[in-house]
Image (tube, helix red, strand yellow):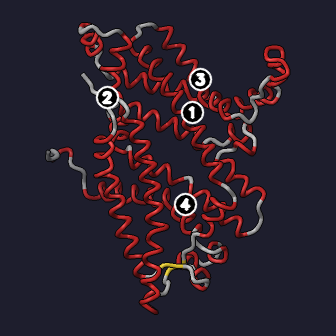
């Protein structure tokens, strides 16, 4: 549909708005790009004074680590088809093989399987195939761009960063599951309730959500540390301690985030016409059956969008997890901060950068897989009557 002439923007306005957007994207993406480049270089190149040396990595190439022209061309081709396949083929495979009613679990399994397959192909299979070919090409197979994955091997193998990753997945999965389970029921009830009291209770809960996390943690910390003494009259000498337990941190993060989750889901439910509930009730459904069989199928964009925000809360949280979890159960973000606080050598600093780059991969994969549902949820939320 063509835009009416009266509504068409001038060339100067289109150019200035496009230039501003491109500049903003460049500023926002530059830190991620730069630390990603640093993480694949030797410490000498990673902290070189010349940006060109950081990008090309002369010291890394001198160590025999790098990419040839063939590696770069094949890598770009594989990366292009991997991204294209994720946007086109993967959604269809998930819908084809996922049982009805388990689409979310199917997306999670599909995303994890895709990530593992990509890592195996890109970082294991391709080097095994291209290495002998480069050796046969002689000078043409020599590295022209310094690159090494030794820092990632050190982080995930020697430093056992995978333990922090599993702890983050445990906390995040718990936060998302509890938040969405409670939030969908509460949001649906508030959306269909005409009571003003429920509305003002939710406003008070949002005020609680707006408080700084440091204020909330300051109240939780003494209780967590002294929990065994507090619970001793109930459980005796075997009273459990809350400090350092992931399930207790999940409860705290859910308590902090739940008002926002309920408020957001309530807004999505309000966009669904009440006539759908009435039709389901006429057909013999109970209130819960109408909610599960009629309302939830059209609510998935809103649920996935809200789940993304809950995921980001648990995944990116620093203050709550760093203070309420012990070193054994620490998540990834506080663990990376520990790298910077206690390590002094440039090698350790590059390993910290590699760990920081590693935690961005699940976020990119999550947004890439659920991008259609996220956009639909942010723009419309659900079917409108």
Circles 1 and 3: CB atoms closer than 8 Å:
no
Q: CA distance from mark 2 to mark 4?
A: 35 Å
**Structural distance between the alpha carbons of marks 1 and 2:** 25 Å
Which quadrant of the view contains residue 282? top left
How crowded pointer 4 is (Cα within 10 Å; few <14, some 14-19, many 20+) is rated as few
Mark sitting earlier along the chain (2/3): 3
Q: Earlier in the sequence, mark 2 or mark 4?
A: 4
Q: Is residue 95 left or right of residue 118?
A: left
Residue behind mark 2:
382
Reading the image, the residue beneath label 4 is 31
Q: Nearer the viewer, mark 1 or mark 3?
A: 1
Q: Is residue 240 left or right of residue 59?
A: right
Q: Nearer the viewer, mark 2 or mark 3?
A: 2
Among the two numbered marks 1 and 3 on one chain, the one whose residue lies closer to the N terminus = 1
Q: Which mark is drawn over residue 207?
A: 3
Q: CA distance from mark 1 to mark 3?
A: 24 Å
Q: Position of residue 170 (x, y in %)?
A: 59, 39
Q: Earlier in the sequence, mark 3 or mark 4?
A: 4
In the image, residue 355 sits, relative to residue 123, either above or below, namely above
**Residue 274: x %, y % from top left:** 30, 14
Disc assigned to residue 174: 1
Nearer the camera: disc 3 or disc 4: 4
Which numbered disc flags the more N-terminal residue, 1 or 2? Answer: 1
SS for tag 2? loop
For the point 24% across and 51% down, which residue is it?
9
The mark that comes first in sequence, 4 or 1, is 4
């Amino acid at each position: 549909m063509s835009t009416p002439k009266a509504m068409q923007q001038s060339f100067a306005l289109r150019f200035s708005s496009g230039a501003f957007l491109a500049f903003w994207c460049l500023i926002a993406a530059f830190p991620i790009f730069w630390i990603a480049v640093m993480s694949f270089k030797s410490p000498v190149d990673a902290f070189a004074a010349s940006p060109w040396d950081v990008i090309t990595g002369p010291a890394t190439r001198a160590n025999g680590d790098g990419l040839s022209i063939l590696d770069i061309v094949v890598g770009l081709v594989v990366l292009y088809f991997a991204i294209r396949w994720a946007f086109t083929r993967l959604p269809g495979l998930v819908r084809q093989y996922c049982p009805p009613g388990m689409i979310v679990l199917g997306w999670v399994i599909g995303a994890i399987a895709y990530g593992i397959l990509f890592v195996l192909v890109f970082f294991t299979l391709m080097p095994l195939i291209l290495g002998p070919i480069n050796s046969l090409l002689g000078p043409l197979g020599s590295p022209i761009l310094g690159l090494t994955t030794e820092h990632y091997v050190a982080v995930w193998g020697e430093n056992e960063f995978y333990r922090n990753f599993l702890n983050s997945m445990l906390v995040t999965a718990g936060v998302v599951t509890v938040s969405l389970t409670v939030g969908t029921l509460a949001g649906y009830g508030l959306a269909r309730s005409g009571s003003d009291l429920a509305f003002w209770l939710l406003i008070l809960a949002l005020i609680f959500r707006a408080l700084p996390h440091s204020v909330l943690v300051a109240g939780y910390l003494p209780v967590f540390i002294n929990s065994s003494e507090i619970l001793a009259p109930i459980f005796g000498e075997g009273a459990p301690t809350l400090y350092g337990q992931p399930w207790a941190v999940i409860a705290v993060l859910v308590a902090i985030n739940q008002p926002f989750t309920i408020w957001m889901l309530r807004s999505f439910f309000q966009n669904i016409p009440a006539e759908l509930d009435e039709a389901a009730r006429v057909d013999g459904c109970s209130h819960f059956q109408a909610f599960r069989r009629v309302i939830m199928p059209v609510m998935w964009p809103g649920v996935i969008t809200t789940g993304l925000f809950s995921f980001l809360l648990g995944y990116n949280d620093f203050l709550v997890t760093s203070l309420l979890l012990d070193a054994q159960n620490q998540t990834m973000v506080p663990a990376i901060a520990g790298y910077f606080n206690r390590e002094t050598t440039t090698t350790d600093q590059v390993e910290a950068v590699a760990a920081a780059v590693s935690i961005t991969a699940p976020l990119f994969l999550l947004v890439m897989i659920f991008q259609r549902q996220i956009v639909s949820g942010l723009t419309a939320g659900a079917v409108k009557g």
